[in-house]
């Protein structure tokens, strides 16, 4: 293959513009390594492409750059490298510090905002802590009070229930048809006293209800005496 | 703050970098070098984008997207494989083709055709596009060449796809594309 013919076949342009297919690219890259004139042709076409594009430049919208830099704001980092690699003469060395200024100023301002925001957050959260703690304290006190009240009610309820059961059993006793009720009035001189005897004539059980009896003196108790079939 | 920024820009216009310096600084994430890159190449790249995306506003959006890609992918640029500008041009072309192929763009184009006024506006934009950059050059090509370049360069189809679309042999597509590019080169060099 005559290399001049190959170069002028349009393959260079096709390759540079990314229009060549894989096979063409492989072929060109292989030939390139042995024929420096191919590389030269590529360089030349790339240069003329750039020249044409530059001479056809269209001014972008005024705000495109601003929008772009805003979008990349967080990705710009060290501009210090400018100082090392580019500041070769005095004129440029003068320029660099001025350009450096806006960046730290920006980040310092950013830091101020962040610091201010965190202080505000801290104060707010401290305030909330106090508020919630007092709420918590009063709630805890209320819980204790309610618990006490609940216990008291429970005890009362138990007592009432016991009383109710007692009364109920008394009532059943009184309403039983086998029971004979004997009201025993006080002897003359003690007319105010009253005791009632309940006698179950089936089971032969006897119950005594001390309706109105004075309290038995210390160490003594009431006894029920009866005459059964004429015997004491 | 704003004054500083303007001052910074005006300084950059004065400054000049060699391509090697520029690439080195960009890889070091240097904002000043990036700003310089934008000031010097945004117009050229916009003309490349505008050749494909024929709406000014949208083309500017693509330009912004392209510059973000340049910034984020600069590490992958290898100067052994070609000039920085060629690399940026291919990013621009691919981003533009992606935009044109997207559903949103297709729909907006269809909507435009619905109203006469819009259609006229689109027509006049189209004419303007034909008068700049590669489009202008391609416009001067023979019909059969123009079609191939249109599909390959501006619409991003592979030679194989074009062969199937136009129902012509792959060899013919290759020959026509190459011939078209030879003509392009001569026009460009004039």
Image (cartoon, rainbow, N blue to C red):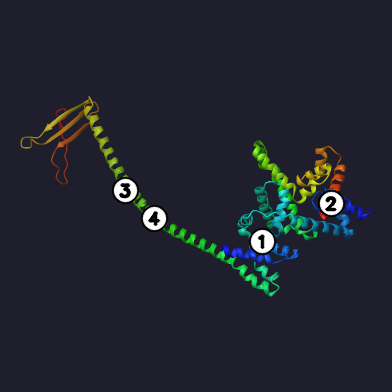
* Quadrant of the rendered image containing residue A168: top left
* Residue shown at the point (86%, 44%) measured from the top left: B176
Q: CA distance from mark 4 to mark 3?
A: 26 Å
Mark 3 and mark 1 residues within 8 Å of each other at the beta carbon? no
Q: Which residue is mark 1?
A: B35
Q: CA distance from mark 4 to mark 1?
A: 52 Å
Mark 4 and mark 3 residues within 8 Å of each other at the beta carbon? no
| Chain letter of disc 4 in the image | A
Q: Which residue is mark 4?
A: A131
Please tell me the numbered disc located at residue A148: 3
> In terms of secondary structure, where does tag 2 sit?
helix
| Quarter occupied by the N terminus of chain B | bottom right
Of marks 4 and 3, which one's residue comes earlier in the chain? 4
Q: Is residue A17 left or right of residue A216?
A: right
Q: Which residue is mark 2?
A: A25
Residue placed farthest to the bottom in the image? A90
């Amino acid at each position: 293959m005559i290399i001049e013919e190959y170069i002028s076949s349009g393959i260079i342009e096709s390759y540079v513009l990314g229009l060549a297919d894989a096979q063409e690219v492989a072929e060109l890259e292989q030939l390139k390594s042995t024929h420096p004139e191919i590389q030269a042709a590529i360089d030349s076409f790339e240069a003329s492409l750039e020249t044409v594009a530059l001479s056809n430049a269209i001014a972008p919208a005024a705000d495109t750059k601003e929008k772009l830099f805003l979008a990349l704001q967080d990705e710009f980092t060290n501009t210090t490298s400018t100082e090392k690699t580019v500041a070769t003469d005095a004129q440029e060395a003068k320029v660099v510090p001025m350009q450096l200024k806006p960046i730290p100023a920006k980040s310092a301002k950013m830091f101020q905002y962040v610091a201010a925001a965190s202080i505000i957050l801290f104060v707010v959260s401290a305030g909330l802590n106090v508020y919630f703690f007092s709420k918590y304290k009063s709630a805890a006190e209320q819980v204790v009070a309610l618990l006490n009240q609940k216990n008291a009610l429970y005890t009362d309820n138990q007592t009432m229930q016991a009383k109710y059961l007692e009364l109920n059993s008394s009532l059943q006793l009184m309403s039983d048809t086998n029971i004979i009720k004997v009201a025993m009035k006080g002897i003359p001189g003690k007319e105010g006293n009253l005791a009632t005897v309940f006698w179950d004539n089936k089971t032969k059980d006897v119950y005594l209800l001390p309706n109105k009896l004075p309290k038995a003196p210390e160490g003594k108790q009431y006894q029920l005496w009866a005459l059964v079939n004429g015997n004491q | 703050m704003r004054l500083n920024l303007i001052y910074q820009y005006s300084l950059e216009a004065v400054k000049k970098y060699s391509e090697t310096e520029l690439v080195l600084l960009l890889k070091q994430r240097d904002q000043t070098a990036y700003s310089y890159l934008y000031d010097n190449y945004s117009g050229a790249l916009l003309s490349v984008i505008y050749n494909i995306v024929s709406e000014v506003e949208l083309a500017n959006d693509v330009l912004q997207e392209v510059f973000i890609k340049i910034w984020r992918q600069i590490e992958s640029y290898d100067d052994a494989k070609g000039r920085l500008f060629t690399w940026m041009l291919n990013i621009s072309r691919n981003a533009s083709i992606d935009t044109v192929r997207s559903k949103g763009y297709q729909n907006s184009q269809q909507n435009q055709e619905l109203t006469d006024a819009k259609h006229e506006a689109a027509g006049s934009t189209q004419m303007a596009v034909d008068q700049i950059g590669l489009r202008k050059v391609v416009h001067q090509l023979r019909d059969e060449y123009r079609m191939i370049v249109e599909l390959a360069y501006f619409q991003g189809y592979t030679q194989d796809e074009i062969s199937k679309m136009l129902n012509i042999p792959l060899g013919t597509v290759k020959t026509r594309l190459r011939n078209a590019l030879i003509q392009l080169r001569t026009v460009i060099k004039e």
